[in-house]
Amino acid sequence: MSDIKSLDDLKSAVGSATPAAAVAAPREPMRDKLGRAYATGKRKDAVARVWVKPGSGKFLIRNNKGEYVDYTLYFARPVLQMILRQPFQVANVEGQFDVYATVAGGGLSGQAGAVKHGISKALQLYEPALRGALKAAGFLTRDSRVVERKKYGKAKARRSFQFSKR
């Protein structure tokens, strides 16, 4: 270490040593004993727990009564159903995986986003080769936008009370 006297000597010393981060090991699939991959997805106030396993494309969501129902019944709007199918379309594995999800908190739109985020994370944990396509589409990033808090002296977060001259 004492023989480094210039910046060029330092660059050559650093260049010769290969750090562990530079030599990335291939990602290993993470599955449980039943062959499922598990991930949590979040969006706004909604949190989804998602299990993905190979199958025929069955997609079940646990409702507030504890029963698993088809996603078309739980998310009745076509836009929300489209949001849930996006990770499979991007990864080109539509109809190859069964999905079981439980969702809590928030509204339907936030819950759909949370399930989509959970599906994307679980897919890339089950099959690491799918990570590139899902990451390029932006599905592995947690959308951090949340509702702004209400401030005192205001009707909502920023809206003032109606002005009255008299």
Image (tube, grey):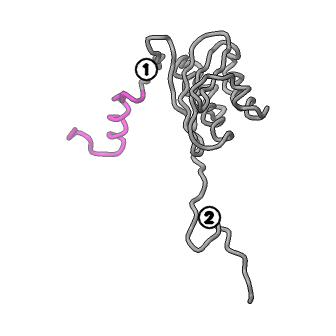
Name the front one of labels 1 and 2.
2
Near-viewer residue (105 or 6): 105
Q: Which residues are magenta?
A: 1-22
Q: Is residue 164 above or below residue 142?
A: below
Circle 2: residue type? Ala
Query: What residue is shown at x 73% (from left), y 83% (from top)?
Result: 164
Task: Indicate the position of residue 87 as horizontal and vertical percent values.
Answer: 66, 26
Secondary structure at badge 1 equals loop
- State which quadrant residue 18 falls in: top left
Name of the residue lying farthest toward the right: 78
Name of the residue lying farthest toward the front: 65
The question of residue 3 being in magenta is answered with yes
The question of residue 38 being in magenta is answered with no
Task: Indicate the position of residue 113 as horizontal and vertical percent values.
Answer: 64, 37
Near-viewer residue (112 or 60): 60
Of the 4 image quadrants, the one containing the N terminus is top left
